[in-house]
Amino acid sequence: MSLPIDEHVNAVKTVVVPAAGMGTRFLPATKTVPKELLPVVDTPGIELIAEEAAELGATRLAIITAPNKAGVMAHFDSFPDLEATLAERGKTAQVQKVRRAAELIKAVPVTQDKPLGLGHAVGLAESILDDDEDVVAVMLPDDLVLPTGVMGRMAQVRAEFGGSVLCAVEVAEDEVSNYGIFEIEADTAEDDVKKVKGMVEKPAMADAPSRFAATGRYLLDRQIFDALRRITPGSGGELQLTDAIDLLIDEGHPVHIVVHKGKRHDLGNPGGYIPACVDFGLSHPVYGAHLKRAIKQILAEHEANDVSDVK
Ligand code: UTP
């Protein structure tokens, strides 16, 4: 039995985590290891997301998973034999590490048989939401938005303006073509909140309507499910979540962004994953100091090589 919605801080009971993608940018690792289980230092990205969802006040993590990615759900199981062996050997800190994911939140599987797009994946979550849930919180496990807490701010904005609230970060002009970019209305009372007029996928620099790029955090009104049923598949036969959001905007549904001022790491490709590991590694109480020295040495070696290449 789940708790009623009014017993949840921020009025969010379920966080939906789409994790059924193919992870092609991480091949060959993702032949057998789901991208969501790749460790940031020692903790899989999906456990970091579970932590953020629990911090938001959610009690259920609806993981959209693919038939060949059983390891993702297994990460939230209990491991009594492993725990017993570790306990016998006095490794109590490791026992805590093994238990942590399952203790954070209740993970519920939703199977997406084929990777038919993020919109399709989110649409599947409708079947597990309770009647008292009028918002769909979605967190992409590819995206780390730090420090955590932006979803709490987004819940405040939804309480004030209604509708749906997304998260954005301001990117450099020459990076706009890598992201979904928001077209915004000129003025909203609060500095970190903007009303959205539309979205453009990966625009050329000259065509970008702003420098506010979408990140993987969404608080969507339940009407999104109806919109997802009314859109048609886009490129590659995939149902795009942004198309459904665009449809809602066209129909007058209020959509705002919260502009996040902190960091964002994109774990979805090696080029973003490696800096995330370095960032977390440098702050790590055990590995940080050594890593800092190692990175300085690696940089010095590379710079020396670059200089000798030039000669
Ligand atoms: P991405 O497009 O970034 O992930 O989708 P991907 O498809 O796994 O990666 P590449 O492009 O092949 O390297 C964003 C999020 O949506 C999920 C992914 O698992 C990822 O967390 N997703 C995507 C689904 O759950 N189902 C889909 O059909 C597509």
Image (cartoon, rainbow, N blue to C red):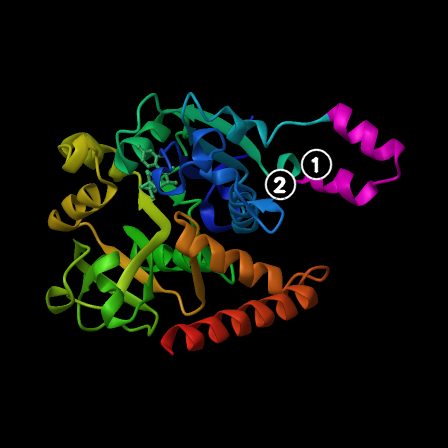
Please, what is the three-letter code of the amino acid marked with disc 1?
A: Arg
**Residue at horizontal 21 percent and vertical 33 percent from the top:** 238
Disc 2 and disc 1 in contact, CB within 8 angstroms:
no
Q: Main secondary structure of the magenta part?
A: helix
* Residue 111 to residue 165: above or below: above
The x and y percentages for residue 140 are 40, 45
Please give the residue where the numbered disc 1 appears in the rendered image. 99
Query: Closer to the N terminus: mark 2 or mark 1?
Result: 1
Task: State the quadrant of the N terminus.
Answer: top right
Looking at the image, can residue 220 be seen? yes
The x and y percentages for residue 35 are 45, 39
Q: Is residue 93 magenta?
A: yes
- Label 1 residue near ligand 1, CB within 8 Å: no
Q: Is residue 261 magenta?
A: no
- Label 2 residue near ligand 1, CB within 8 Å: no
Q: Secondary structure at mark 2?
A: helix
Looking at the image, can residue 130 be seen? no
Q: Residues within 10 Å of mark 1 (few under 14, many from 20)?
A: some
In which quadrant of this rendering is ligand 1 seen? top left
Q: Quadrant of residue 96?
A: top right
* Residue 103 to residue 1: above or below: below
Q: Quadrant of residue 90?
A: top right
The x and y percentages for residue 262 are 45, 68
Q: Quadrant of residue 271?
A: bottom left
Boundaries of the magenta span: 80-100
Please give the residue where the numbered disc 2 appears in the rendered image. 104
**Residue at horizontal 57 percent and vertical 47 percent from the top:** 51
**Residue at horizontal 22 percent and vertical 54 percent from the top:** 254
Q: Secondary structure at mark 1?
A: helix
* Residue 153 to residue 133: above or below: below
Please, what is the three-letter code of the amino acid marked with disc 2?
A: Leu
The x and y percentages for residue 85 are 82, 29
